[in-house]
Amino acid sequence: MRQRLAILGSTGSIGEQTLDIVRENPERFEARVLTARSRWERLAEQAREFDADAVAIADERHYAPLRDALAGTDTKVYAGEEAVAQLAAAGDTEVVVNALVGYAGLAPTVAAIGAGKKLALANKESLVVGGACVMPLARKHRAPIVPIDSEHSAIFQCLAGERAPVRRLIVTCSGGAFRDLRREELAGVTVEQALRHPQWRMGAKITIDSSTLVNKGFEVIEAHWLFGTPAERIDVVLHPQSIVHSMVEFEDGAIKAQLGTPDMRMPISYALMYPDRAARPGERFDFLAHSQLTFAAVDREKYPALEIAYDCLRRGGTAACTMNGANETAVGAFLARRCAWLDIVRAIRHALEHASFVASPTLDDYAAADAEARALAAEFLEL
Ligand code: NAD
Ligand code: MG
């Protein structure tokens, strides 16, 4: 029987690559539900190609043109952010691929888990913000969460079949767009420079997060929630070639790594197929063409965001939610050329210093912490 997928954020980088996997495996998967924020024309094309049951457009201003574009088809058309979460939980799909960006992914993650669905999770912000609520909920509803993020997919693959506790997770880091710049050179960097990631082509927000290493900090938090590993057993190591996607060290000293050319369709395909694997076309990794795989320490003074994320993980409560909310506002401002690149981490620090803190938050507390963090960052950046 074919697995029926809901792909949230189907017009984005991960969403489009998920549809590539569906095209490659028509006997295994069907895309039944698709959602986007504003790109209604692309969403309508996708809905026609896959003969979707339902689509949702989060930005309600695009409802009418989307509905008109799908007139005469069987596809039901919904609008609004709540519709995205409702479709995540709705009847006819077994798997939800959460490829939304940012805090907006949390409610659909919770909805999918509450409906007991398998969650293929790209939206790391769900766990950064609300891992303390999301993981127990997933256990309660027996909803499996399989990571799409390449580092976490690598760790997940290394842990498959293991029962012994791990000594250490080693999360690799490409270093982002500015890895070859000195600290003094970071003050004047532009949006165009920050968007030029050396290894991966991704959505704008995560590409900026990679340049500040906020992304790597978030991945440490994500790893903690997915694998239950405490902060002091998660290391980050710089690996510019992005071939070793991450590693696990066991108590006997053995280290397992997962390697491959950087291509998100591999972890997406694994998340959908697990515990099987797809027969995927494409070039194979050539060790002789990559004779050097190198590793180095991350410069924590150049990239303070990494330590800030570790601090948030150790503090728990709403700390990481505050970091995330401030970061989303600051990255938006940087992309709109309304603040400098260095201001992103400054705004995060400001929000963390001034925000209220809830030690055992509910989902409502996260919503309040997110709103407060955004307001604090906006005030700091004079937006
Ligand atoms: P993207 O910006 O390319 O796509 C985001 C998608 O979500 C789009 O379809 C957009 O329409 C939709 N969306 C955005 N905001 C929304 C909102 N408020 N409500 C409803 N829909 C909304 O982003 P991406 O690069 O595909 O990243 C998606 C997620 O996957 C992020 O959490 C990112 O950190 C993670 N991730 C991405 C990559 C990658 O290679 N792109 C790798 C690892 C992890
Ligand atoms: Mg990653």
Image (tube, grey):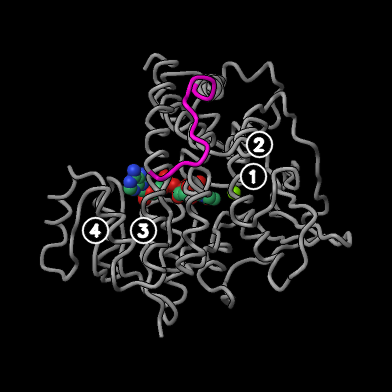
- Measure the C-alpha gap from mark 3 to mark 2: 28 Å
User: Given the image, on which type of amino acid does mark 4 rest?
Assistant: Ala
Numbered disc 3: secondary structure: helix
Mark positioned earlier in the residue sequence (1 or 3): 3
Query: Given the current orientation, which residue lies at the most extreme front position?
Result: 360
Q: Which mark is residue 44?
A: 4
At 46% across and 41% down in the image, what residue appears? Answer: 361
Q: Is mark 2 within 8 Å of ligand 2?
A: no
User: Given the image, on which type of amino acid does mark 3 rest?
Assistant: Ala
Q: Nearer the viewer, mark 2 or mark 4?
A: 2
Q: What range is drawn magenta here?
A: 351-363
- Measure the C-alpha gap from mark 1 to mark 2: 7 Å
Kindly identify which residue carries mark 2. Answer: 310
Tell me if residue 357 is in the magenta stretch.
Answer: yes
- Measure the C-alpha gap from mark 1 to mark 3: 24 Å
Of residues 342 and 166, the one nearer the viewer is 166
Q: Which mark is residue 220?
A: 1
User: Given the image, on which type of amino acid does mark 2 rest?
Assistant: Tyr
Quarter of the image containing the C terminus? Answer: top left
Using the rendered image of the protein, determine whether residue 202 is visible from the camera's viewpoint.
no
